[in-house]
Each structure stands twice: as C-alpha cells, then as structure tokens.
C-alpha cells in the first residue's frame, strides 16, 4: 500500500512540474490566463488530496500540525496540507498565495462576493463529497458518535469572511487565523473568536466528519 501511494504521489508531482514548464506558453497572453492556470493547478491539487486522504491519519493531531504550515483555517480544520512543491509552482506562476477556499476543491470558482450561510455550506459539502468525507450534524459540546472528529464553521456578520476550527482528540479546539503559522487553542472556539473579534463571527454549523481512511491505525 505504501509503495502504491508513493508511486501515485510521484506521478502527481511530475504532472505538476510539467504544468510549471508548459502553462506559461500554453496560455500566452490570454485574458483568462491566470484563471486557467489557477483551475489546472487546483484540479491537480484535488487529485493529490483524494490520494492523501486515503493514507493520512484519519484524525489529525496537534503533534503533526507542522505539516499544515502552508494552509489557512479551512484546510487546517480538514487536516489537509499543501505540499511546498504546489505552493512554489503556483506562486511562481500567479501573483497570489496558494490556497483553496470552500468549494474550490470541488470545482467552484473562487468566491468574490459576500458569503451567505447557504453558499458557504453548499461549497463545504461539495468539497466533503468530492473527498468522500462523511459529515454528521453535531454541536460544540456533543460527544463523538461516529469515530471521526468535529469541525466548526463560522461566518462573519457582514458575510465578508468565513472561519473554521477543529476539535482534537484531547477535546481542545484549535484553529489558525488566515495563513498565520500560529495555532490558537481554546475549550470553545466561539468564545475565542468573540474575545479577539468582538462578536464579529457567528457559528453556522458544527459537524463530525469521518474520512475514507485505508490505514488501520488512527
């Protein structure tokens, strides 16, 4: 199984490097050049995640969070990393920091207008479905019922920003603020957000998520 994983991973990285050398010539000075490059790299990143999620730990733990240094709060909560090779290729071709907002893993375009509860959750569930992650309704203080772990989804009251946090095996919630490498720990992610953002965010949904892990251990 490990050999198969690394063979597939190597193939993905080779395709990424091929993109790096080909795409600037492929799209030339097209008005949609940046959008097309963004779409192609995200498409390959989706394939990487679909491979990763079968072999990584089913439940992320704080001890391994150094692997998540390149991600924002959304991918952090899902326990999905961005390999440095993806970050370097993307940011050498495009003037943006590499990441994936809700929905982009499943093929939605980057969201530029104000978010609504419905749109945010639609995109979140589309990503979970693409990655074959099961999701069950939960609450901040509910016990784990499906051998998964909990994530919490927030939206600011102006609809301009979203936020995600996750609960770890020890019951403590952790979160990143944007791409900041620091982790913020709390007993309750809502009270933490209220403290630093003065009640700017609202809790939209809490889910227990279960990944399609093929490893025996967790």
Image: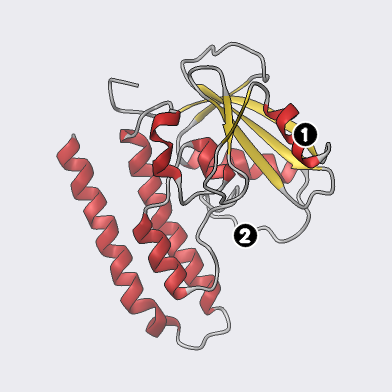
181 shown above or below 153 = below
Using the image as rendered, state which of residue 76 and residue 112 is in the foreground. Answer: 76
- Quadrant location of the C terminus in the rendered image: top left
Which mark is drawn over residue 195? 1
Residue 46, position as x, y percentages in the image? 43, 51
Q: Name the image colouring.
A: secondary structure
Visible in this render: residue 60? Answer: no
Regarding residue 27, the answer to whether it shows in the image is: yes
Report the residue at 45% width, 47% height from top. Answer: 69
| Marked residue nearer the N-terminal end (2 or 1) | 2
Tally of numbered discs? 2
Q: Looking at the picture, how far across and down is residue 18, in whole percent?
A: 29, 71
Q: Identify the residue position indicated by label 2 in the image.
A: 110
Q: Is residue 194 left or right of residue 213?
A: right
Residue at image position (51%, 37%) is 78
Residue drawn at x 48%, y 19% as measured from the top left: 169
Above/below status of 157 relative to 92: above
Real-space CA distance between mark 2 and mark 1, rounded to the nearest whole angstrom = 29 Å
> From the viewer's perspective, is residue 90 above or below residue 82?
below
Q: Residues within 10 Å of mark 1 (few under 14, many from 20)?
A: few
Mark 1 element type: helix
Q: Residue 22 in the image: state x and y as whole percent.
A: 33, 78
Question: 3 or 86: which is nearer to us?
Answer: 86
Q: State the image quarter where residue 182 is shown.
A: top right
Kindly indicate the quadrant of the structure image that contains residue 85.
bottom left
Instruction: Decide: is 126 above or below 143.
Output: below
Helix or strand or loop: what does disc 2 sit on?
loop
């Amino acid at each position: 199984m490990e050999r198969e994983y690394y063979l597939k991973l190597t193939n993905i990285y080779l395709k990424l490097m091929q993109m790096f050398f080909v795409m600037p010539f492929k799209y030339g000075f097209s008005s949609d050049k940046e959008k097309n490059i963004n779409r192609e790299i995200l498409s390959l990143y989706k394939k990487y995640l679909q491979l990763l999620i079968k072999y990584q730990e089913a439940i992320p733990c704080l001890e391994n969070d150094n692997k998540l240094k390149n991600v924002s709060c959304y991918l952090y909560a899902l326990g999905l990393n961005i390999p440095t090779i993806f970050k370097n290729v993307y940011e050498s071709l495009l003037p943006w920091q590499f990441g994936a907002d809700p929905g982009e893993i499943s093929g939605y375009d980057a969201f530029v207008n104000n978010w609504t509860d419905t749109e945010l959750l639609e995109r979140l569930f589309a990503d979970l479905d693409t990655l074959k992650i099961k999701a069950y309704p939960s609450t901040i203080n509910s016990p784990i019922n499906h051998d998964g772990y909990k994530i919490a989804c927030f939206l600011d009251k102006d609809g301009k920003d979203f936020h995600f946090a996750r609960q770890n095996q020890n019951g403590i919630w952790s979160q990143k603020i944007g791409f900041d490498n620091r982790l913020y720990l709390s007993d309750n992610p809502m009270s933490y957000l209220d403290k630093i953002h003065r009640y700017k965010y609202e809790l939209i949904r809490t889910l227990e998520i279960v990944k399609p892990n093929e490893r025996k251990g967790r």
